[in-house]
Amino acid sequence: MMQIIEELRTLLPDAEATARAGARLAPGLAPGMLVTLSGELGAGKTTLVRGMLRRLGWAGTVKSPTYTLLEHYIVSSLYFYHFDLYRFNDPEEWDRAGFSEYLRPDTVCVLEWPERAAGWLPAGDIEMRFEHADTARVLTLDATSVAGSACLAAFAANP
Ligand SMILES: Nc1ncnc2c1ncn2[C@@H]1O[C@H](COP(=O)(O)OP(=O)(O)O)[C@@H](O)[C@H]1O
Ligand SMILES: [Mg+2]
C-alpha cells in the first residue's frame, strides 16, 4: 500500500545534514514537479539543492542562482531547473521573464524564494521551510500532491 505523507519535520544539525536531506529527496523527484524552498538568507536552501544534484549524479559545481536567477542541469535524464528569485523586486517579473515556460511535464523545478513570485506560481508539489534553531535548522516539508507525497515517502524510507 502506498504511504501517504503530508508533512515531515526534521532537525538539521549542520550543513552536511542539509545536503543529506536533499540527497534523500532526490530519488523521489519526478518530471513535472515543482519544489519550493523558503527561509531567510543563509538558511540552507542552496545547500539542500546541491545535495539533490549530487545524488542525481551531477559532479560539477552547483552555483547559487542568486545573480543569474536560474541555473539549469540535465541529470539522470531530468531537465532540472534551479531558481532563486531573491532579486525580484516585483512578482510580475516572473511573468516578464517568461519563467512559466520552465514549469513543464518534463521538467523538475526547484525554486528558492517563491514568495518573490507570489500570485504567479502554482502550489509546489513539495513546499519546504527552513527555520533557525540556534546554530542548526529545522526543516518542514509539506506535500500538496500525490507526487509530492511519494517524494516524502522516499525521504522517510531512506534515512
Ligand atoms: N543545518 C545547518 N546547520 C548549520 N549551518 C548550515 C546548515 N545548513 C546549511 N548551513 C550553512 O549555512 C549557510 C547556508 O547557505 P545557503 O545554502 O547558501 O543558504 P540559502 O540558499 O538559504 O541562502 C552555508 O554556510 C551552509 O554551510
Ligand atoms: Mg540560496
Image (cartoon, rainbow, N blue to C red):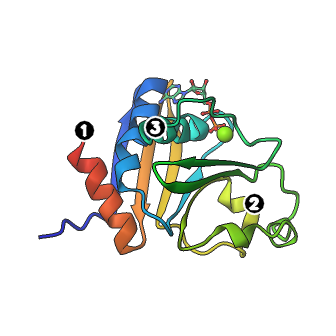
Residue at 48% over, 65% down: 31
Identify whether 19 is placed above or below 86: above
* Figure quarter occupied by ligand 2: top right
Residue at 30% over, 63% down: 150
Q: CA distance from mark 2 to mark 3?
A: 30 Å
Whole-percent x, y for residue 61 in the image:
63, 29
- N-terminal of the pair, mark 1 or mark 2, is 2
Given residues 87 and 72, the one toward you in this image is: 72
Q: Which mark's residue is nearer the viewer, 1 or 2? A: 1
Q: CA distance from mark 3 to mark 1?
A: 19 Å
Residues at circles 2 and 3 in contact by the CB criterion of under 8 Å: no
Residue 16: in sight, yes or no? Answer: yes
Q: Quadrant of residue 116?
A: bottom right
Residues at circles 3 and 1 in contact by the CB criterion of under 8 Å: no
Q: Would you say the beta carbon of the disc 2 residue lies within 8 angstroms of ligand 2?
A: no
Q: Residues within 10 Å of mark 2 (few under 14, many from 20)?
A: many
Q: Which mark's residue is nearer the viewer, 3 or 1? A: 3
Looking at the image, the residue that sits furthest to the front is 77
Q: Is residue 82 left or right of residue 56?
A: right
Q: Residues within 10 Å of mark 3 (few under 14, many from 20)?
A: few
Q: Which mark's residue is nearer the viewer, 2 or 3? A: 3
Which dot marks residue 116?
2
Residue 14: in sight, yes or no? Answer: no
Indicate the amino acid at tag 2. Answer: Arg
- N-terminal of the pair, mark 3 or mark 1, is 3
Given residues 97 and 76, the one toward you in this image is: 76
| Secondary structure of residue under mark 2 | helix
Residue identified by numbered label 3: 57
Identify whether 42 is placed above or below 112: above
